[in-house]
Image (cartoon, helix red, strand yellow):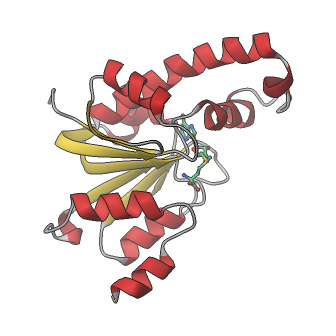
Amino acid sequence: MNPLVIEMLIPDGYKTLFNVFTDLCSGREPSNTSFLELGSGGRSFVIFLRALGYQSEGVEGQKDLAVGPHIFHGDISELERIFWDRKFDFMGANGVFCYEAQWEFFYRVVDSELAPERYFYDNNFKEVMNKTFDIRIEQMLKAASSRLKLGGSLIVTEPWSIDFCVEVAKKAGFGISVYEQQLAVLQKTIGR
Ligand SMILES: C[S@@+](CC[C@H](N)C(=O)[O-])C[C@H]1O[C@@H](n2cnc3c(N)ncnc32)[C@H](O)[C@@H]1O
């Protein structure tokens, strides 16, 4: 496909993730390149990469979004249970490893009794929730590392800051090969 056409068809919000992904896998055969999107939302990016020939799949925790082929329903922290011994060359996550996205996931999926606005007016509650999210995000990143091939990369893009995610990723054992304001490439450099 013409690169200009491809550029025009990149789903909204995924431009950086797409450009970094294609740079990282330049020279590789798309049909031999596996990619898992963590928190694939409306699955537009998974479908887009498949149209370009990549072995792209997604995992999504909201049941109503986790529909259609190549999309798995489940929690990112449970990737080992979902994929068993399968491993991926690359992973990507757009707007997932941040407090705001985790809060949204929490009140939608984990505890639907919670009022969405509480996080924004009750500072004590927000502090407690953020501590929970620190732990959850570390679990999610460890699970991601367990399903990446050695040398594989997880590309993370965030609409605001990436700093918090990078700190947690170091604790989860990732090497950091790119670190910009809204982008990090986390590399699996140790383990099996
Ligand atoms: C802000 S949305 C971004 C959706 C999509 N990546 C995009 O850019 O359009 C975050 C997505 O990640 C999913 N998500 C967040 N935490 C998750 C978790 N622990 N397990 C599975 N999905 C999760 C949410 O359900 C939501 O669809």
Camera-side residue of 44 and 95:
95
Q: Residue at x 57, y 47 (%)?
A: 159
Camera-side residue of 44 and 170:
170
Q: Residue at x 48, y 72 (%)?
A: 10
- Can you say which quadrant of the picture contains the N terminus? bottom left
Q: Quadrant of residue 53?
A: bottom left
| x then y, percent, for residue 136 | 52, 22
Q: Is residue 51 above or below residue 136?
A: below
Q: Is residue 52 above or below residue 99?
A: below
| x then y, percent, for residue 89 | 23, 51
Looking at the image, residue 13 sits to the left or right of residue 7; the answer is right
Residue 102 at least partly seen: yes
Looking at the image, residue 192 sits to the left or right of residue 142; the answer is left
Q: Quadrant of residue 113?
A: top right
Q: Residue at x 57, y 66 (%)?
A: 12
Looking at the image, residue 188 sits to the left or right of residue 129; the answer is left
| x then y, percent, for residue 119 | 78, 25
